[in-house]
Image (spheres, rainbow, N blue to C red):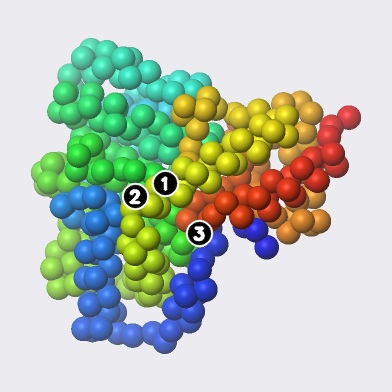
Amino acid sequence: MQLRIPGPTPCPPQALEAMGWQMMNHRGKEFGEILKSITERLKRVFQTSGDVLVLTASGTGGMEAAIVNTLSPGDKVLSISNGFFGERFGEIARSYGAEVTSLASEWGHPVDVDALDRALKADRDIKAVLVVHNETSTGMTNRLKEISTVTRNYDKLLLVDAISSLGCINLPTDDWNCDVVVTGSQKGWMVPPGLAMVGVSERAWQAHAHAKMPRYYWDLGKARSMLEKWQTPWTPAVSVFYALDVTLDMMLSEGLDNIFARHARVAEMARERVKSLGLSLYVGEEYASDTVTAVSASDRIDVPRLVRVLRDEHDVVISGGQGKISGQIFRIGHLGMVCEDDIQVVLEALSKALPQAQKG
Ligand SMILES: *Cc1c(COP(=O)(O)O)cnc(C)c1O
């Protein structure tokens, strides 16, 4: 089966085998060694000398942690929004009482970096900027480097949802001055769902000291102090740690640059093949994501039927659209364990399935 959705992604057999290992005492020495080694290797992938904390949560738990650990009710927050997950990030902040303004562009369209500059200039009280690095819902990568240059100029906290980019697309946390960076185990990390990994800068810790949003399970301060003893505050998803222990070795032996290059190659191939079938991409190619390709269904393709035919007759699983563009696009995930041969299989199946999914 070709599971080509943007998470959960396929896991290598070694990771699946690790998921079956016997439990151990999560407060014992053995687990401590695994946690220490995972933490040290995660820092290399995050490209940070700051802290990286591993929470037992899906990605959204990590997004919530980013908000509640750095902000107080009433704080002004600017939420960059050009897709489903950008909207979610703003909603989380709003539900904890932040005063959220959206800097929105149409879904699938890039953020206007000059507008960001103007917005931060116009309101000096804005405390933090929220951004999704790779907007999985539209298959678009936001220009995080340029965005971070602006937020640095105005000395704002930058909270980043990198759930579907980290470990696949270059994101140098420290160089780009990102304060909190969140990712999730079931995306590029090639392990099952269950862990959110959160990078925290020194500036974010300073904000944490004054942040008054309610928090308990997601208190990163508790996670940091327990990490001094190589433990987690609450019982961790031990089996997913075993799997991550295995895939981090695979990732670091492949090398970050090679991983980024492989994702870029595979994505380029996906885009070229999609276009050669006479289909159009949902976003401009200069912003197209290296981890998920969104294809316009126009009014010709019945997306639910296409997804069904691919699954039932070709053993290929892809995604439809999310939220307000459901039915208008379909998405091919190509992150984590993926190579050119996989894309070849998916696009061959797509070319066979398309005639069966025409509308009218
Ligand atoms: C998958 C994803 C999420 C949601 O993560 P969950 O693990 O489902 O909570 C959030 N943001 C982005 C960009 C994602 O790709």
- Which amino acid, by three-letter code, is at mark 2? Asp
Crowding at mark 3 (Cα within 10 Å: few <14, some 14-19, many 20+): some
Counting from the top left corner in percent of width and height, residue 144 is at 32, 32
User: Is 323 located above or below residue 24 in the figure?
Assistant: above
Residue 130 visible, this orientation: yes
Nearer the camera: disc 3 or disc 1: 1
Q: Residue at x 74, y 45 (%)?
A: 350
Picture disc at residue 337? 3
Q: Is residue 301 left or right of residue 335?
A: right
User: Which image quadrant: the N terminus?
Assistant: bottom right
Residue 232 occupies quadrant: bottom left
Identity of the residue drawn at 14% across and 73% down: 229
How many numbered markers are drawn? Answer: 3
Of label 2 and label 3, which has the lower sequence position? 2
Label 2, on which residue? 257
Q: Distance between the Cα atoms at labels 3 and 1?
A: 13 Å
Mark 2, Cα crowd under 10 Å, few <14 / some 14-19 / many 20+, is few
Which corner quadrant holds the C terminus?
top right
